[in-house]
Image (spheres, rainbow, N blue to C red):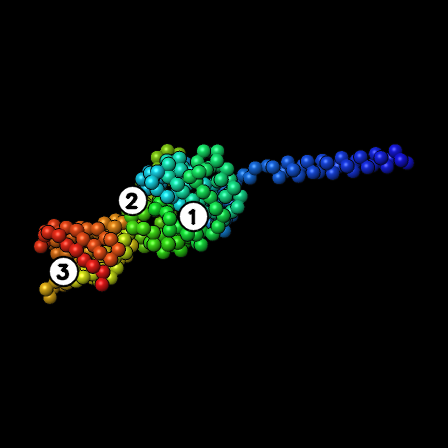
Amino acid sequence: MKALRRVLQSFVVLSFAVVAAASLAQEKKPFEPVVGQSGKDVVWVPTPAATVEKMLDLAKVTPQDFVMDLGSGDGRNIIAAAKRGAHGKGVEWNENMVELSQRLAREAGVADKAEFVQGDMYAADISKANVMAMFLLTENLDKLMPKFLDLKPGSRIVINGFGITGWTPDVTERANGDCGSWCTVHLFHVPAKVDGTWQMPGGQLTLKQSFQKVTGTLATGGNSTPIEGSLKGDEITFTAGNATYTGRVNGTAMSGDVKGGPGGKWSATKK
Ligand SMILES: C[S@@+](CC[C@H](N)C(=O)[O-])C[C@H]1O[C@@H](n2cnc3c(N)ncnc32)[C@H](O)[C@@H]1O
């Protein structure tokens, strides 16, 4: 009887040990992301490596840049930017993906430059970024667009595949090499905010802005001339009649040169 009890006891102990070892092994199994796995507002599909490089090329990423990715997945955009010497931060909803990107950054030797945090991209503070590198749907990008327009003028936004409603990309190019269905990259420069009325020494400039495009009127000496132009970051160009105005916007002031028409220099102050 005693012998039978001892056998049973050792069987129970052994069974516990086997179960404990199995669950430990299961716990240790590294997380493997699956293409198409659900995300909070968009599923995970990785940007192909060739397209990541094209995005960073178009944005002309240098060690002086601070790059952010919203919905950073396994962290590849930020890790690639960090390999170019930039600092960056990825915001990702899925905790497992955050841990994976942190591990991949360590393995790539760029953990000091590439930070990954768990969070909702819609609540993320992106004000430190001067480059955004992302792969999101137009519906996500449209919701984020006001944040993008609040970035410092001249900040670059590069996006894999999708566009932002109403905002024409400044450049669209295709990646070379093995990029499957995701080869197209759009580049946008955040324009300075110029919408409104500006006082010029000899007249009044009224501008209506839609992203990087400007229309409006230049009123001088009782004449009102329609104007049309564009912005690339803080650089503004517009034509009024046969005159072309080029200049730089600095908050509530802008100034530059006039070619044709009256010629010379021009300046304006926001009213
Ligand atoms: C299409 S993947 C892009 C991944 C990565 N940026 C790339 O280029 O490879 C989109 C990512 O956004 C994440 N995501 C979805 N909704 C999110 C949200 N509200 N906040 C943060 N991340 C989100 C998903 O988990 C997924 O990893």
Instruction: Please give the name of the residue rendered at 33% of the width and 40% of the height, measured from the top-left corner.
Output: 64
Q: Nearer the viewer, residue 105 or 45?
A: 105
Look at the numbered discs 3 and 1 and tell me whether their residues touch, using CB distance below 8 Å.
Answer: no
Residue pushed farthest front? 112
The answer to whether any part of residue 124 appears in the image is yes
Marks 2 and 3: in contact by CB < 8 Å? no
**Mark 2 residue's CB less than 8 Å from ligand 1:** no
Q: CA distance from mark 3 to mark 1?
A: 44 Å
Residue designated by label 1: 70
Q: Is mark 3 within 8 Å of ligand 1?
A: no
Q: Position of residue 99 (x, y in %)?
A: 52, 41
* 3 vs 1, front mark: 3
The reply to whether the residue tagged 1 has its Cβ within 8 angstroms of ligand 1 is: yes
What residue is shown at x 75% (from left), y 37% (from top)? 15
151 with respect to 225 (left or right):
right
| Mark 3 to mark 2 CA distance (whole Å) | 35 Å
Rounded to the nearest whole Å, what is the CA distance between mark 2 and mark 1? Answer: 21 Å
Q: Secondary structure at mark 2?
A: strand
> Which residue sits at x=20%, y=59%?
269
Tell whether 198 sits left or right of 134: left
Q: Quadrant of the N terminus?
A: top right
Label 3 CA crowd tier, 10 Å (few <14, some 14–19, many 20+): few
In this view of the protein, which residue sits in the foreground, 145 or 48? 145
**Residue 117 in the image, given as x and y percentages of width and height:** 48, 46
Task: From the top left corner, tell me how far across and down residue 125 is, in percent.
Answer: 41, 52
| Residue highlighted by disc 3 | 201
* Residue annotated with mark 2: 171
Say which quadrant the C terminus sits in: bottom left
Left or right, 185 with reference to 213: right
The amino acid beneath tag 1 is Leu
The mark nearer the N terminus, 3 or 1, is 1
The residue type indicated by label 2 comes to Val
